[in-house]
Amino acid sequence: MTKNEDSGDKQRAAEIAALPPHLRQIVNYIGMAYSNKEIVAASGLKPHTVNSYIKEALNLLGHRRGELLMEMVKLGLADGNVE
């Protein structure tokens, strides 16, 4: 890993950690490869709310869902342990 890659990774991890708690929770579930239905069951939120939060988090982070999952795996955050 180059110095620039490491710097970018730290910045991306900080961006994820800086999300509001309700969006961080959703990103945690995405990082654990939960489906929307699984997120609804685990979080107790309504399906419309989960869909809305997912869209908001992805827009803020500039990723598609699969890209976000891969990014979280790369950053070591795919265990749902985003601080």
Image (cartoon, grey):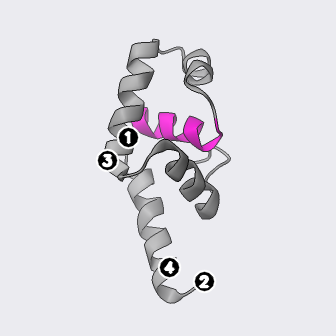
Looking at marks 3 and 2 on the same chain, the residue that comes earlier in the sequence is marked by 2
Q: Residues within 10 Å of mark 3 (few under 14, many from 20)?
A: few
Drawn side of residue 52 relative to residue 79, left or right? left
Residue at the image point whose x is 64% and y is 56% from the top:
73
Task: Tell which circle, 2 or 1, labels the residue nearer the N-terminal end.
Answer: 2
Q: Quadrant of residue 57?
A: top left
Q: Which residue is mark 3?
A: 60
Q: Residue 49 lies in what quarter of the image?
A: top left
Per the image, the residue denoted by label 2 is 1
Badge 4, how many Cα within 10 Å: few under 14, some, many 20+? few
How far apart are labels 4 and 3 at the CA level?
Answer: 21 Å
Q: Kindly identify the amino acid type of the residue bearing the numbered disc 1.
A: Ala
Q: Secondary structure at mark 1?
A: helix
Q: Is residue 8 above or below residue 21?
A: below
The structure residue drawn at horizontal position 54% and vertical position 58%, both measured from the top left corner, is 71
Callout 3, which amino acid? Leu
Residue on which the image places disc 4: 5
Q: Position of residue 2 (x, y in %)?
A: 55, 87
Magenta segment includes 40: no
In x, y percent, where is residue 37?
Answer: 59, 18
Mark 4 and mark 3 residues within 8 Å of each other at the beta carbon: no
x then y, percent, for residue 18: 37, 51
